[in-house]
Amino acid sequence: MRSKKTVWWIICSIIISLITGIIVGDLISVKSFGRKLFLTPNNKVNVILDIINEDYVDPVNMREITEGAIANIIDELDPHSLYISGSELQDVNEDMDGHFGGIGVNYFLYKDTVVIVNVQHGGPSSQAGLMPGDRIVHVNDLPFAGSSITNDKIFQTLRGPIGSSVKLHIRHPNSDTLATYTLRRSSILMTTVKAACEPEKGIGYIKIFDKFSHTTYDEFVQAITTLVSQGCKSFIIDLRMNSGGSYDAAIQIINEFLPAGKMIVYAEGKSFPRQESIADGSGTLPDNQVVVLIDQLSASASEIVAGAIQDNDRGLIIGRRSFGKGLVQNQIELSDGSAVRLTIARYFTPSGRNIQRKYALGKTTEYNQDWLHQLNNGEGYHADSIKMDTTTTYKTVHGRTVYGNGGIMPDIFVPLDTAHMTPYYIQLENKDVFNKYAFEYSDANRAVLSTFPNYRALWAYLKTQPIFYDFIRYAEANGVKRRTNQINRSSNQISLSVYAYIIHNFFGEEAFYQVYLSNDPVILRAIQAIQKGESLPQAIAARK
């Protein structure tokens, strides 16, 4: 009788033989198919896609497979090269072009109803007589309300080709009947620049939102012209949370501040000969004090501006270390309506530093999370927690030491202000309570609130109203439990946020930021620097 051990080994041998047979059988099946394909490094992907299309056992969507394959190939490059599908390209191009086809309204989706909040002056809606508070009930004779309405659907429906028409059924406030309007879509500017002046201080504030588009420079020049006419002589340029965008727009803006012959930036790559951008002397602000604000989300074009100001000792950089993107992309559009945005060069600040932080090919996720690790390590709160690459140093025009390979380090560090960021306040933001309350308050009091001539007058009025505790009660009714200690800690910012959101409904984004940022420690430090003359050339030259 055979032992159990012997039987076990026989069974194992049989199983191994069967598995080997399966594998060999697969190999034989493939070999017996009778094809041998000759490849070159440049056609391998196409050949494999053709094989899948012709020979795969089941029908497959080759378009989806091809799109995915291309995206995966690009993902193996640096974190800023990317593939843009045909369905995405229009939105991407509109962001860069700075305009789109639309009807010229800002809206708020309130209880499954689209409510107009602001009407753009001179746009199709303004010309037709639409007003804040109007409800859009039908679009092109189809219902446009209910649980199926999303912000994305609103966005896609109201936008369209310039010159195309859209039919709206509108319910005006205090009316039960519907009014019909047919609007012709026009070019709507996606404003990237907002400005405000404090005449008593002679300081102008310019915020460049989100990114630099092809219209940003023209908007910037218009803002400067307006601020100067209002008595502003010194300027704060806020590039915080600005992810970059148009390389050319950044160069044009810097040209406004530098005398002729000063280097702005240069770029070069393997197939991109060195290209220098030099100030031509046509700028309108060669001597005015300037302070640039940056943070951990300021990148690319924002860093070109900050780097040129810093390396030329032209002004002060205040805030926190910037993102660190020193690569230049070229967008190559393909015949099927898609595009590849490919890194073609590195750019260098006037002192010769490339501020691109370290990355590994194909490791985009880790790269994008790196700044979160920096914050967790204390970079947002303590300047001495910032680990700059000090192996290579660079010198500004007046001999100050600066570093590359990791963003722009500000001349004056201002830590994150988290004193008011209690769990209670964060919950208010996450549940969009400020926006909802502001809309309801504005809608209920529109007749009174719309009579104020400017945002300052409205702000002064709101401060006299019992809004704070009314808001706290509203928040509690909307799922944010009252926490007295946290409310006390956050009270100032809660009040500012409520006022700012209400004011936004009547005077727009520019007024919103005037109120919302009125206690911003970075802006306050910038104002202090200007008032003390810290951003004057001689003062900057003395900084070592």
Image (tube, rainbow, N blue to C red):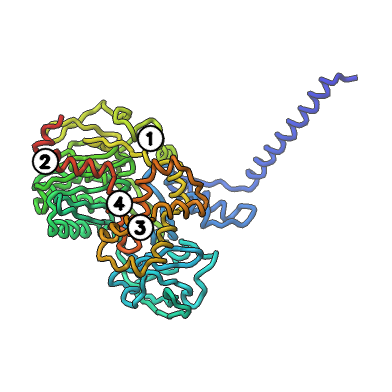
Residue type at mark 3: give it: Gln
The residues tagged by marks 1 and 3 sit, at their Cα atoms, a distance apart of 39 Å
Question: Disc 2 vs disc 3: Cβ atoms closer than 8 Å?
Answer: no
As drawn, is 406 to the left or to the right of 9?
left
Query: Which residue is labeled 1 in the image?
Result: 375
Q: Between marks 4 and 1, how big is the CA–CA gap?
A: 24 Å
Location of residue 8 in the rendering, given as x and y in whole percent from the top left corner: 80, 24
Mark closer to the observer (4, 2): 2
Q: Position of residue 97 (x, y in %)?
A: 30, 60
The residue positioned 35% from the left and 48% from the top of the image is 342
- Circle 2 residue: 536
Disc 2 marks a residue whose amino acid type is: Leu
Q: Secondary structure at mark 4?
A: loop
Q: In what element is the residue under mark 3?
A: loop
Inter-mark Cα distance, 2 to 3: 43 Å
Q: Which residue is mark 3?
A: 465
The crowd level at tag 1 (other Cα within 10 Å; few <14, some 14-19, many 20+) is some
Q: Point out which mark residue 245 bears.
A: 4
Does the rendering let one see residue 228?
yes
* Quarter of the image where the N terminus is located: top right
